[in-house]
Image (cartoon, rainbow, N blue to C red):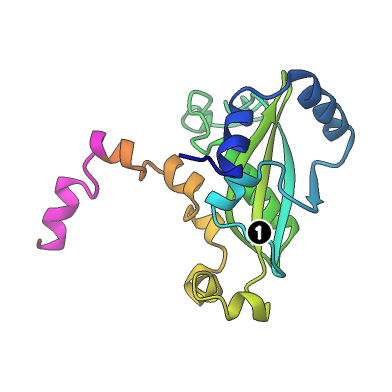
Amino acid sequence: MAKGLYHYIKQAWKKPDAATLRERMVEWRESDAIVEVDKPLRLDRARALGYKDKKGFFVARVRLKRGGHKRTRPNKGRRSKRLHIRKNLKMSYQWIAEQRAANKYGNLEVLNSYQIGKDGVHYFFEVILVDPNMPEIKNDKTLNWIGNKANVGRVFRGLTSAGKKSRGLSTKSRELKVRPSIRAQGRRGK
């Protein structure tokens, strides 16, 4: 059976050319932390996550520092109960990248995101953003749901794929944990 273009792009990203990717990351490090790009770098991944090459779609590249999910110890007065240094941030880097992109582009909604690279210091993600007020989006039957009032600020409420995964709502975590809990089922009255 003949393979399509997206199949070969996907295969190429499984083992990317190290030299080319390294050169790109050097450029990305020197640019701003959040940059709007013309086209997605991983077209196969972007298309799989809902990207379309039409008005109303935007792609932003986000650079994040790696490490530091552990809380820093307060150095001023606190009672011992509030010192909390053992707890780590439960948000994934991808979810943080989505939120930063959403903060920068306030009129857009985050559709999804994917990783494009990492080095010793940074993670790099591409975030797909959609303008829900564009007529092209409003008339698209597969995408007009993003304009509903219920989807405003969806990334901040953990409704994107990365957010759901961090909240423990992915299919893998559902197998490990029963949601809602047995006690919550009892309160609902079944």
Depth check: 71 or 151 in front? 151
Q: What element carries label 1?
A: strand
Depth check: 131 or 1 in front? 1
Crowd band around label 1 with a 10 angstrom C-alpha radius: few (<14), some (14–19), many (20+)? many
Residue 171, percent from left and from top: 32, 42
Residue at (32%, 36%) from the top-left corner? 172
Note whether residue 181 is visible. yes
Give the quarter of the image for residue 31: top right
Quadrant, the N terminus: top left
Give the quarter of the image for residue 45: top right
* Magenta highlight range: 175-189
Residue at (66%, 41%) from the top-left corner? 42
Q: Is residue 109 a member of the stretch shown in magenta? A: no
Quadrant, the C terminus: bottom left
Residue at (50%, 44%) from the top-left corner? 162
Give the quarter of the image for residue 54: bottom right
Residue 123, percent from left and from top: 68, 30
2 w.r.t. 152: above or below:
above
Residue wearing tag 1: 129
Residue 107, percent from left and from top: 70, 69
Q: How many labels were placed on the picture?
A: 1
Amino acid type assigned to the residue bearing label 1 in the image:
Leu
66 w.r.t. 44: above or below:
above
Instruction: Specify whether 185 is left or right of 32.
Output: left
